[in-house]
């Protein structure tokens, strides 16, 4: 077989509506040109995120019916804990209601003002949680990860020389933890090799620095390892995952990605002393240590989703769908980060609109144009999302990207072909993308709520 189609069939459907263009223009005006603020019912194809937007299986829906809503040690927690431990091998498994709470707990308990936290690329919530402690989130992805045109297998790798230079420059005591995002969402959804994970772990441990994985898309990352890394072809994705986690001291996880659930996450660690502090803080902000802000039924759905996400037919279809989406765009001459990552296609806006001034937010303008022209919602990962710094200054990241995230088990290739047709329209008439200015912004994570006006 050339490729793996959906290893499932449709049992229930959900109506989606394409509003007429005039109404879409009105919705944009009402939302002050921020697509986060458009009601979801008014979106036709929603590629804002792959997080929590996947379709659950019949098996997961069935699991909801055996939700045990007891306050402490419900049976679903036991299943959840067993499943996570079986996959990761970590000792302490602490549920949270989503990934950023795991980050908040980890950094509250480990990081202080003036510290540095290296990673390949910090995702926006990870960065914000590090900075919230007064520490610096440092991105040290390999140089090839910064070249959107370069086709290389592991562009999410962290540059070990850059890491060692940072340790020597600021001192080991200023680095309480090293992170690594698999796959590297903010760097184009690119995977990290097993060899790089192992070497990074050894380097951090040489200096006594704990190593935590941001494991949201660990299954997709491990599938790429199986497909691309020499010597890994005959191993199961689960075996690879187990080895990957064995190099880390713990992980943060949003189960809204490779947990195939609509809500949930966890933080896991092997550090007994840290686990006590994490659990005390969890009780303060989320709930008892066996539910962490989730219902028992959610824990069941996550446990079942984690197992389904390791199904290699599913992973073959999933990565192939994203790859084919990327190929359709490339065939139309629309520049994207290459090769396609695991969960999304990232349009290279600097390549698409080379003359557009960065301080007029070209990536954001593309998200506005995608909605206006086709009812499609995407997210900018560029000057607006990553350009705001805690001291109030604005520095633009090298890459200006628009992420077209593909929800898991939701859209067909026909839906994605429609999205390609809207981007073709924008490619042919670049005046559809209008310059923007920010008229209001929050002090951090401004993209979620900022107001804009077209200039
Ligand atoms: C790499 C990465 N880390 C952390 C998070 C945060 O997870 P959550 O949205 O569940 O808080 C996300 C969410 O998209 C992510 O992609």
Image (tube, helix red, strand yellow):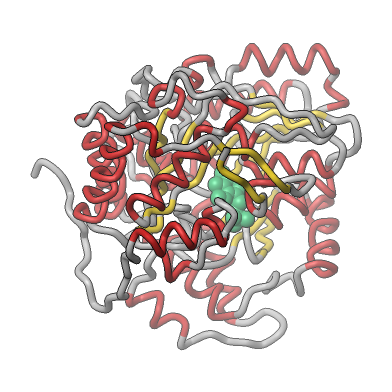
- Tell me if I can see residue 243 in this picture: yes
Expressed as whole percent of the image width and height from the top left, the position of residue 328 reads 21, 37
Query: Residue at 89% across / 38% down in the picture?
Result: 112
Q: Does residue 436 lie above or below 79 as drawn? A: above
How many labels were placed on the picture? 0
Give the quarter of the image for residue 58: bottom left
State the residue in front, 70 or 144: 144
State the residue in front, 333 or 353: 353
Query: Residue at 63% across / 82% down in the picture?
Result: 74
For the N terminus, the image quarter is top left
Expressed as whole percent of the image width and height from the top left, the position of residue 304 reads 43, 69
**Residue 435 located left or right of residue 290:** left
- Tell me if I can see residue 199 in this picture: no
**Residue 73 located left or right of residue 28:** right
Q: Does residue 356 lie above or below 30 as drawn? A: above
State the residue in front, 194 or 168: 168
Expressed as whole percent of the image width and height from the top left, the position of residue 79 reads 53, 72
Q: Does residue 399 lie above or below 222 as drawn? A: above
State the residue in front, 441 or 265: 441
**Residue 138 located left or right of residue 64:** right
């Amino acid at each position: 077989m050339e490729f793996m189609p959906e290893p499932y069939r449709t049992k229930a459907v959900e109506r989606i509506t394409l509003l007429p263009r005039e109404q879409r223009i009105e919705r944009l005006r009402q939302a002050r040109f921020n697509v986060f603020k458009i009601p979801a019912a008014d979106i036709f194809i929603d590629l804002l995120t792959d997080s929590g937007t996947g379709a659950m299986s019949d098996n997961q829906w069935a699991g909801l019916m055996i939700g045990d809503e007891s306050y402490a040690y419900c049976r679903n927690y036991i299943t959840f804990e067993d499943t996570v431990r079986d996959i990761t091998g970590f000792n302490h498994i602490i549920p949270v209601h989503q990934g950023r709470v795991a980050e908040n707990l980890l950094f509250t308990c480990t990081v202080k003002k003036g510290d540095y936290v290296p990673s390949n690329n910090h995702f926006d919530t990870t960065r914000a949680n590090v900075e919230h402690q007064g520490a610096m989130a440092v991105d040290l992805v390999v140089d090839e990860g910064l070249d959107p045109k370069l086709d290389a297998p592991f562009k999410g790798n962290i540059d070990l020389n850059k890491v060692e230079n940072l340790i020597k420059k600021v001192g080991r005591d200023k680095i309480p933890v090293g992170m690594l995002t698999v796959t590297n969402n903010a760097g184009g959804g690119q995977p990290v090799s097993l060899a790089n994970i192992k070497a990074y772990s050894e380097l951090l441990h040489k200096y006594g620095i704990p190593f935590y994985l941001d494991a949201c898309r660990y299954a997709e990352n491990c599938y790429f390892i199986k497909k691309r890394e020499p010597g890994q072809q005959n191993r199961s994705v689960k075996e690879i995952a187990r080895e990957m986690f064995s190099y880390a001291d713990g992980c943060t996880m949003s189960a809204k990605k490779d947990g195939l659930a609509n809500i949930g996450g966890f933080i896991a660690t092997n550090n007994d002393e840290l686990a006590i502090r994490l659990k005390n803080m969890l009780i303060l902000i989320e709930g008892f240590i066996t539910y962490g802000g989730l219902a028992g039924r959610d824990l069941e759905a996550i446990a079942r989703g984690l197992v389904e996400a390791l199904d290699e037919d599913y992973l073959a279809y999933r990565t192939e769908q994203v790859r084919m989406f990327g190929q359709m765009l490339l065939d139309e001459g629309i520049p994207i980060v290459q090769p396609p990552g695991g969960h999304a296609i990232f349009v290279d806006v600097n390549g698409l609109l080379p003359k557009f001034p960065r301080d007029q937010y070209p990536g954001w303008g593309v998200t506005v144009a995608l909605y206006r022209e086709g009812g499609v919602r995407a997210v900018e990962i560029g000057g607006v999302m990553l350009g705001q710094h805690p001291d109030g200054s604005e520095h633009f990241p090298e890459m200006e990207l628009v992420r077209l995230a593909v929800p898991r088990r939701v859209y067909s290739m026909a839906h994605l072909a429609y999205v390609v047709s809207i981007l073709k329209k924008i490619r042919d008439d670049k005046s559809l993308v209008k310059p923007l200015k920010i008229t209001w912004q929050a002090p951090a994570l401004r993209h979620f709520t900022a107001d804009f006006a077209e200039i």
